[in-house]
Amino acid sequence: MVLVRTSERIGRVPPSGIRKFFELAEEREDVISLGVGEPDFSAPWAARDAAIASLERGRTSYTANRGMYDLREAIADHCAERYDLRYDPDEEILVTTGVSEGVDVALRALVDPGDRVAMVDPSYVSYRPGVLLADGEPLPVRTRENEHFRLTYEALDRAGASEADLLILCYPNNPTGAVMHEEHLEPVAEFCREHDLRVLSDEIYADLTYSGEHTSIATLDGMRERTIVFNGFSKAYAMTGLRLGYALGPAEGIGAMNRIHQYSMLSAPTTAQHAALEALVSCDDDVEEMVSAFNRRRRFVLSRFSEMGLDCFEAQGAFYVFPEVPGDDEAFAEGLLEDQGVAVVPGSVFGEAGEGHLRVSYASGLPQLKEAMNRLEAFLA
Amino acid sequence: MEAKRELLDVLCTNARTETADLARQTGLSEDEVETAIADLEGEGTIRGYQAIVDWEAVDEDHARAAVELNVTLDRETGYAEVSERLAKFPEVSSLHLVSGNYDFLMIVEAGSVRKISRFVSEKVAPVPEVTQTVTHFVMETYKEGGIGMNGGDDDDRLSVSP
């Protein structure tokens, strides 16, 4: 007899495709994993030290629901200086438990049952379940390799996004590594303005942009008032486990998100907020060093793919590349794991448009990447 | 300059990185890598290539010491002259002029603690400009040349994550 009846809503959310590969990888001992979505570096020491100091001083209480004021102020300064995103720390910034929580509360705060939510396909695995859990209807918008996996006005139109209520963007993109600069974002902004779409823009990989500067869609004409921007400390500051992100947006949107956040999370972890504040104040050099290392690895992996004859567009952001593979991507990834002990994630996990590709993370040291590429070459031979 | 800086970063991590891998990481051609390294060597930016060795794994008597030195100078003899003389000793693996309570910090290596003691007392102390030596024997090395000496860098990340 089932004593715990689960909701109909949860039945709509399929099990994670990533989970399966995690379990397969865990069965073997000699695995080199290129399936990781987090840096191999540790958080900068200054940030860790600030976390330790906050504990030593007994700062273990809740903070304000929206996050420590000092941190919100530092976020406001940082985003204004770095991305030309200007937000009021009093009303327009919410500190969240990672970007994941931010996106979840935004979807719950902004989506009514039956609302159509357009999202870039392929993109991060949590958006679709997040929309389903908010009783919305996901609307994937295919991006194409020959268009550098960038979202276009035409792609939005083809997918019927003119009928959508909301658009989720993720650039630099997980899993493709695609980036969109101002000239690419402008037509998307035009579409959103024409069809009155609100935008959730996940910019967690903004600092990991290897060509040109990152542009946020919220800086384009008429977009600030309809966009919630997400960023955080997980990727650029290697602080995934500290779970700290933030959302920037108009007061009404952020206020609505905070109404949910204050009941579900109360406030983001206090220790992590102290670490994040220090990260913003004093860890620019650490970030720069990590980004340089990622960039060298990116070039290395792309170069090896090219030598192997694997088609792969030149990823310019995040720490993933997205090569095309022969045949079914899931079968390819399973074969690669079984034969050579190299774990990667099949592209189809990230949406239908990812079929026939692999997500290969280069957030590993050069010796591991080198060995993994040699094994991949042997597998292809 | 940017490319040379990148090459130096990679070489400092692993000086044995093959030319092909250096090219892949920097986006330069192999010829460009070789030319840039030749330039860096020629202009004296790269002074040499050495292995980071855990000597205790090879020879348990191997000893190391950090020696503080104070010197007196006169019109004829400056730090450069004194350092030139000290640096010639093969036992001296590095020598720095430092700020603070003493003048030189000298790292000395030899086959035993006794050999280091004798070297300092018989070769270094008698140098006319040297007025004082303080020897600190290295008891354990945890990091050398940017490389941790305590074994594996465990990767405790999940093998597959979103």
Image (cartoon, coloured by chain):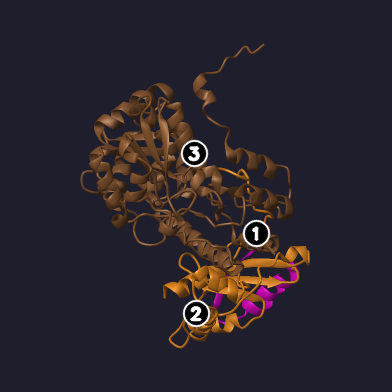
Chain colours: A brown, B orange
Q: Is residue A214 left or right of residue A378?
A: left
Which residue shows up at 37% across the image and 48% down it?
A155
Residue type indicated by callout 1: Ala
Q: Quadrant of residue B119?
A: bottom right
For residue B122: magenta?
yes
Mark 2, residue position: B45
- Please say if B36 is above or below A109: below
Q: Position of residue B79 (x, y in %)?
A: 48, 80
Residue A372: assigned label: 1
- Span highlighted in magenta in the image: B113-139
Count up the numbered dots.
3
Mark 3, residue position: A242
Disc 3: CA contacts within 10 A as few (<14), some (14-19) or many (>=20): many
- Please say if B63 is above or below A189: below
Residue type indicated by callout 2: Thr
Q: Position of residue A80 (x, y in %)?
A: 27, 48
Q: Which label sits in the foreground, 1 or 3? A: 1
Disc 1 and disc 3 in contact, CB within 8 angstroms: no
Q: Position of residue A263 (x, y in %)?
A: 40, 21
Disc 2: CA contacts within 10 A as few (<14), some (14-19) or many (>=20): few
Residue type indicated by callout 3: Leu
Which residue shows up at 69% across the image and 55% down it?
B151
Q: Position of residue A268 (x, y in %)?
A: 42, 31
